[in-house]
Amino acid sequence: MINKIAFTIPIGEGFNVYWYGVIIAAAVLVAVTLGTIESKRRGYRSEMVLDFMLLAIPLGILFARLYYVVFSDIAYNSIIDVIAIWNGGLAIYGAVIGGSIAAVIFSKWRKVPLGELFDIAAPSIIIAQAIGRWGNFVNQEAHGVLITSQNWQWFPAGVNIGGQWFMATFFYESVWNLIIFAVLMLIRKKMKVRGGVFALYVALYGFGRFFIEALRTDSLFVGEFRVSQLLSAALVVAGILYIVLMSRKKKEWPAYEGFYSINLSLEQIEEYRESMKKTKTKKDKDETETDEMKESAEKEQKESKKVSKKNKDKKSDKNEENNEE
């Protein structure tokens, strides 16, 4: 039996730090380091990756857990059970969805090309997945079906859990992810399509995950279908279509010259920040003036209604007097 606790911090009764968390943290650290190197190669300052990760990490964890909780058949008795990610239960597809949402938000906010952001992230994501799968090994989860043949009862073909041997699907996927990582690192300089590296990532990962998922015993289902297999098939098709269709356009992609450009001097960066502050101040001022105009218009409208009602009442009273006469 593998001890899930890496070490204990002597705080109060003791705060346990789990291997699962340590491995995930290591995966994130490697991903950020690689992303920083890749962003510099593409002409971006390392600050961009750090800023993006501040948004991507929390959203990735949130959606990874939500994905698992939504599709899992586990009954959660309290909010603590729902957020107990240290016990496992994070779905990688949920993390990718959360990270993609973060990329869209960051791209709109910081004016960074979305395709470039995805391409920088792709190698980092897949190497993080390769490392993170070993968290499943520690938690003894994400394994495959029971191995009955003694010829295959050895690691890494199988994994021993409670005295029984199961297919080590976490290991299969980790190896497949490393292969994808190697492919992406080789192809990233040759890819002419912006967003193409990420598209290749989702297509290759979806292809491998489709078959590995069929071997697992803890799949999440929608009816009789495995959720990850459905999503994997869709990603394979989407990734291939994107690369093929965008390649036909032969579009020229302009070099990035925004705030995170590695070519900006310190003075230019400060000027950019000041201009952003002024733009925000002007926007806030315009919004305030717009709100004041709306309030003034609403007030005038209310006053107009009151005067109209008052005149109507006077007219009604006058008509009544005439009728009495």
Image (spheres, rainbow, N blue to C red):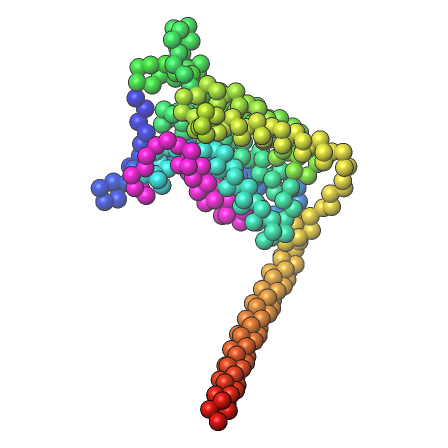
In the image, 90 versus 12, the foreground residue is: 90
The x, y position of residue 39, in whole percent, is: 61, 42
Q: Residue at x 37, y 37 (%)?
A: 85
Q: Is residue 269 above or below residue 235?
A: below
The x, y position of residue 238, in whole percent, is: 63, 32
Outermost bottom residue = 325
Asked whether residue 63 is drawn in magenta, I would say yes
Residue 136 quadrant: top left
Query: Is 182 placed left or right of 15 in the picture?
Result: right
Predominant SS along the magenta part: helix
Write down the region rendered in magenta. Answer: 51-80
The x, y position of residue 175, in whole percent, is: 51, 22
Total label count? 0
Q: Is residue 258 above or below residue 167?
A: below
Residue 290 quadrant: bottom right
Location of the N terminus by quadrant is: top left
Residue 236 quadrant: top right
Asked whether residue 53 is drawn in magenta, I would say yes
